Amino acid sequence: MNNGHAHILLIEDNPGDADLVRLRLVEADSNIAVSCATRLSAGLASLVAETPTMVLLDLNLPDSHGAETYRRVLEAAAGVPIVILSGMDDEEIAVNAVHEGVQDYLVKGSFDSRQLARAMRYAIERQALLTSLDMSRRQQLQFKNEFLSHVSHELRTPLTCIHQFVSLILDGLAGKLVPEQREHLETVFRSVIQLRAMITDLLEATRAESGKISIQPHCVLIGEVIRQAVAMLQSTARAKAVGLEAAVDIRIPFVYADSNRILQVLANLLENAIKFTGPTDRS
């Protein structure tokens, strides 16, 4: 591998196979440092103590077998390339292992020192590329989230101003309106409400995608939340000549949940129901 500082962790319980792999490694590069663990538990402990350049892993160990073996190592050695050295020439296991994050799957006895060195080098390069791509993806996601958050907050200020002044005019505080003026202003008012809802949904989607959405559960009377959601959408329903009612069983007990999130979900469901319900139907 042409790297005098490479540290290889070999997790292998068969002494003969371990010696053969050591020999292949020395033939490829005499400066490679190899530490060996004969059990998965010992290998995991070694990973905690020192992060190796690579893990060479047997699947069947005294304390672990099959896919569970590489999954536990993947969990403990995030970012470390893993190459499986197995006595089983099993295509299905090999494909599943690679899909889950293992870099390569070699069958014992079927490779020489050059093939092992090449597999290890490619594994390290692929893992480095994956790490770089993941960092780039995280940076892009962070930039997108920051941009959307900034734009959304900047839009809220003028929208709030429009909402307040249109409300004042519709309430007649700026003078009497003729029917045509009221109709136009009501259209503006509905559009402002819709745009504010879209911005809120955008912010919520951004927080959910980045794992920053907050949940604050407490004891909730679910009936009250349902009635609140219905009240919020009554005007929208009336505008489409859609009947909107709620019948809540008083025997429903308290639930432990975030009332704001439940209200948000119910409001979205009701809004969609109203949107796709004809004026002669009942929702």
Image (cartoon, rainbow, N blue to C red):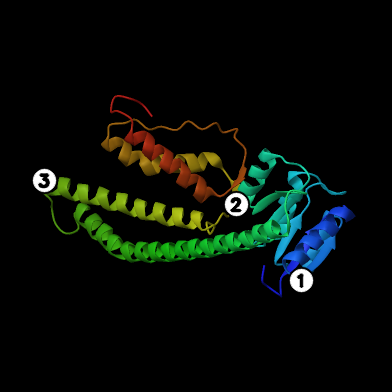
Q: Nearer the viewer, residue 47 or 206?
A: 47
Which tag, 2 or 1, sits closer to the chain's start?
Answer: 1
For discs 1 and 3, the disc positioned in front in the rendered view: 1
Quarter of the view holding residue 162: bottom left
Disc 2 on helix, strand or loop? Answer: loop
Q: Residue at x 21, y 47 (%)?
A: 187
Q: In what element is the residue under mark 1?
A: loop
Locate the N terminus and report the quarter of the image it occupies: bottom right
Q: Which mark is residue 180?
A: 3
Amino acid type, callout 2: Pro
**Disc number for residue 30:** 1
Rendered residue at 40%/37% (across/down): 270
Distance of label 1 from label 3 (alpha carbons): 89 Å
Is any atom of residue 113 visible in this view?
yes
Which residue appears at 64% of the width and 62% of the height? 121
Where residue 240 sits in the image (x, y, percent)? 27, 34
